[in-house]
Amino acid sequence: MAGPKDLDPSSSPRALLGAELRHAREATGLSQDELGQSLFVSGSFIGQLEAGTRRVQPDMALKLDEILGTNGFFERNCKAVNRSKYPDHFAEAAEAEAIAGAIREYAPMLIPGLLQTPAYARAVCRAHQPTAPEEEIERLVAARLERARLLDHPTKPLLWVVLDEAALRRLTGGFAVMAEALRHIVGMARQCRAIVQVLPFAEGAHTSMGGAIKLMGFDDAPSLVYFEGPGTGRLEDDPATVTRYELAYDLLGAAALSPQESLALIESVAEDYAHEDQP
């Protein structure tokens, strides 16, 4: 039997690698759970690899080649598949985000990347890397804006964002940048490309004071939750953990202003910034 062919980088390499993994697993008669046991991961994790929502890491590629008898195929191809324009801690989450059917995000301190304007993104990237050369900042901004192109589709993914009021009030990039950024959010909501709510300061203590939440749902793979800190990030697929943060997100949505009230507040704050920018 002919072995699998190396992947074409011009196609969708993550999806192709997942399809080859599924083919090789089925050819050996292993279930997802059985293969997962050999790799000390869950069967659902194998399903995510096959669906292209998770990365095949180099150490796992070696074990897959050994278990499935694929003659170095996964070792050869995982490096090409894992090349990314995003920082290492965020790359896997960005790639999962691109194929998610639903994205729900709580943003405690800044506007989420998918809703950022170029000027706002530039201010955030510069704040994160104050000594980076200008070309590096522009590369990061371009990658962030490219991520947002997934919202060009008229109906998917479903994007539901709960913004903490702090994200509206923290002056990032100046008055004009904030006015533009907030008006962009309103525009995306009015175009029905995002559901946006604001969690006001007056709500006080809430279920996610520890940080941001990003939940991603998929048509053919288990849901994921992504945690991010300064220079770090982690995807989690444990069902109990995902369920716990889904409840936390639902409680945030219940505590937040309604979408209509939220847009009114965002527009009001944008007008305040626009007036502040006048001579």
Image: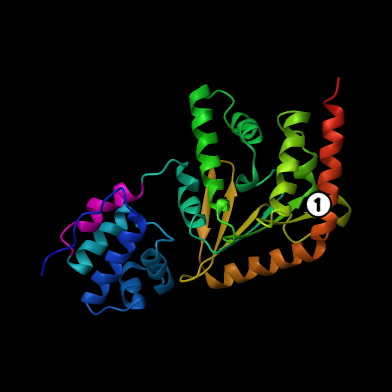
Which residue is rendered at x = 37% and y = 69% of the image? 46
Mark 1 residue type: Leu
In the image, 187 versus 207, the foreground residue is 187
Q: Is residue 151 left or right of residue 39?
A: right
Q: Is residue 83 visible?
A: yes
Q: Quadrant of residue 60?
A: bottom left
- The answer to whether residue 232 is magenta is no
- Residue 168: horizontal and vertical position, in percent? 78, 43
Furthest residue in direction right, as rendered:
202
Q: Is residue 205 visible?
A: no
Q: Is residue 167 above or below residue 162?
A: above
**Residue on which the image places disc 1:** 263
Q: Is residue 263 above or below residue 231?
A: below
Furthest residue in direction left, as rendered:
1
Q: Quadrant of residue 209?
A: bottom right
In the image, 95 versus 210, the foreground residue is 95
Part of the protein shown in magenta: 70-82
Q: Is residue 184 left or right of residue 263?
A: left
Local crowd size for mark 1, using a 10 Å CA cut-off: few (<14), some (14–19), many (≥20): many
The N terminus sits in image quarter: bottom left
Which residue is rendered at x = 36% and y = 68% of the image? 40
The C terminus sits in image quarter: top right
- Residue 180: horizontal and vertical position, in percent? 73, 36
- Residue 13: horizontal and vertical position, in percent? 33, 54
Which residue is rendered at x = 27% and y = 78% of the image? 30
Which residue is rendered at x = 67% and y = 56% of the image? 194
Most prominent secondary structure in the magenta stretch?
helix
Label total for image: 1
* Secondary structure beneath label 1: helix
